[in-house]
Image (tube, rainbow, N blue to C red):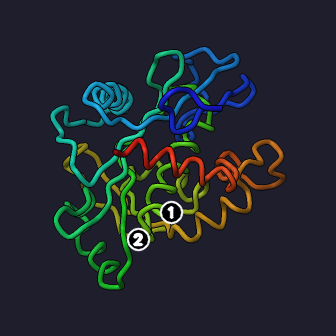
Amino acid sequence: MQHDDAIVSFEVNNDVRDLMLGEGPAEAALDHPLDLQTFHIRMANSQGRREAASLLLKKMYGWRGYSVDPNAVHAPNKITLFAETGGDTVGTMSLCLDNEEIGLPADEIFRDKLDDLRAQHRRLCEPSRLAIDKGVSKRVFAALIHISYIYARNIHGYTDYVIEVNPRHVMFYKRMLGFRDFGGERACPRVGAPAVLLRLELEYMGEQIRKFGGLMEQHGSERSFYPYFFPSWDEPGITGRLLRGAT
């Protein structure tokens, strides 16, 4: 289902919901009541849309005691996606593509580790500034990650995700997406908290999407987020809409 300039739109029943980033039951209060909701994923390709995404980011990071730079410049090697329902922005993430002129945010504290991969001719990209409102469906998280994968892998030929996460979220990203350790814990001055560097080969992510994408509740014993990704045959249409949205 499509809606004006959305990259993709989908409906979610109230029995398909999850808390963001595996938080516990004590944080289950819903900001957005979930009956039957329609979500739209769009490119934040205007100042107004980027500001709406930044407001959600500031809210969710501030709730956890992390700092966010409100004056961060939109870098030319970065795209920002956001999820909207009923006029409210409920999810956002950015994806930075490594190039010779502009590196990645993780270079600030993990440059040595990233240079090791670059020396192996790996093409790196970094999901960052990820925020999902409390009580929003796990499908929103999966949709943002899947669309970023399509942009990085299918359109631009990148090979690896690298991501900085707070130590308490490490097991979530390993269990739910298959990330692996790639750097020790270091202090991250951008958010005023420790960070751990993780790596995920996009070839692996593609294999999981082809195997589990679109299964949702019919996933059997699979406990990752991949059943909540789109089926692989949806990727060509999403790719075309991404290309139009990025121009």
State the quadrant of the C terminus. top left
Instruction: Please report the residue visible at 53 percent of the width from the left and 15 percent of the height from the top.
Output: 86
Reply above or below: 171 against 182: above
State the quadrant of the N terminus. top right
Residue closest to the eye, 210 or 22 = 210
For marks 1 and 2 on the same chain, the one whose residue lies earlier in the sequence: 1
Reply above or below: 98 against 194: below
Residue closest to the eye, 195 or 224 = 224
Horizontal side of 128 relative to 169 (left or right) equals left
User: Residue 136 falls in which quadrant of the image?
Assistant: top right
Residue 219 is situated, as x and y percent measured from the top left of the image, at: 80, 50
Helix, strand or loop at label 2? It is strand
Question: Can residue 131 be seen in this snapshot?
Answer: no
Horizontal side of 231 relative to 75 (left or right) equals right
Foreground mark, 1 or 2, reads 1
Helix, strand or loop at label 1? It is helix
Residue 242 is situated, as x and y percent measured from the top left of the image, at: 46, 46
Reply above or below: 169 against 33: below
Residue 50 is situated, as x and y percent measured from the top left of the image, at: 30, 31
| Residue that numbered label 1 is attached to | 154
Residue 216 is situated, as x and y percent measured from the top left of the image, at: 75, 44
Three-letter amino acid code at the position of disc 1: Asn
Horizontal side of 108 relative to 88 (left or right) equals left
Question: Can residue 179 be seen in this snapshot?
Answer: yes
Three-letter amino acid code at the position of disc 2: Phe
Instruction: Please report the residue visible at 26 percent of the width from the left and 60 percent of the height from the top.
Output: 104
Residue closest to the eye, 86 or 195 = 86
User: Residue 32 falls in which quadrant of the image?
Assistant: top right
Instruction: Identify the disc placed on residue 182.
Output: 2
